[in-house]
Image: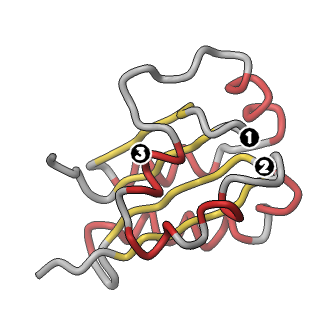
């Protein structure tokens, strides 16, 4: 499996994939900056992406998250998964957008999972 980096994945409250953005930190940043309650509601009305993994399948890919699976899939919230390398210059726009989004997460009913991968 090939992972394009950096990446963001947005899942509905049932764990179905709604958005997948990979390989372009600027596009991902723009997407995150535009997230609103209205845009989440509109996304939730669309069919899920059938060619992307569910939230449970994504959690299963990362052993460190498996122990928290019940918590990460409960609560009826959207879930944003952010994959990146720590301190990676190419991911800077996405990282800055994630920081800006952090204050809005509770209002948007989004939980955040950040996966910092080891580039080595």
The residue that mark 1 highlights is 13
| Secondary structure found at label 3 | helix
Q: Earlier in the sequence, mark 2 or mark 1?
A: 1
Report x, y in % for residue 71: 71, 64
Residue at 42% from the left image edge and 70% from the top image edge: 115
Whole-Å distance between the Cαs marked 2 and 1?
Answer: 5 Å
Residue at 50% from the left image edge and 38% from the top image edge: 54
Looking at the rendered image, the disc whose residue lies closer to the viewer, 1 or 3, is 1
Q: In the rendered view, tell whether residue 48 sits above or below residue 88.
A: above
The quadrant where residue 67 appears? bottom right
Q: Earlier in the sequence, mark 3 or mark 2?
A: 3
Q: Earlier in the sequence, mark 1 or mark 3?
A: 1
Report x, y in % for residue 26: 39, 53
Mark 1: give few (<14), some (14-19) or many (20+) Cα within 10 Å. some
Mark 3: give few (<14), some (14-19) or many (20+) Cα within 10 Å. some
| Secondary structure found at label 1 | loop
Q: Residue furthest right?
A: 107
Asked if the residue under mark 1 is in contact with the one under mark 2, i.e. CB atoms within 8 Å, the reply is yes
The residue that mark 2 highlights is 77
Mark 2: give few (<14), some (14-19) or many (20+) Cα within 10 Å. some
Horizontal side of 47 relative to 78 (left or right) equals: left
Q: Residue furthest left?
A: 120
The quadrant where residue 89 appears? bottom left
Horizontal side of 17 relative to 52 (left or right) equals: right
Residue at 17% from the left image edge and 77% from the top image edge: 119
């Amino acid at each position: 499996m090939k992972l394009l980096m950096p990446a963001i994945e947005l899942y509905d409250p049932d764990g179905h994939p709604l958005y997948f953005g990979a390989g372009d930190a600027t596009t991902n940043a723009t997407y995150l900056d535009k997230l609103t309650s209205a845009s989440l509601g509109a996304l939730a009305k669309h069919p899920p992406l059938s060619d992307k993994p569910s939230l449970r399948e994504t959690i299963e890919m990362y052993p460190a998250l498996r122990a928290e699976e019940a918590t990460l899939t409960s609560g009826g919230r959207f879930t944003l998964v952010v994959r990146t390398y720590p301190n990676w210059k190419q991911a800077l726009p996405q990282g800055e957008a994630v920081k800006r989004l952090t204050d809005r997460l509770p209002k948007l009913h989004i939980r955040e999972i950040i996966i910092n991968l080891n580039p080595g």
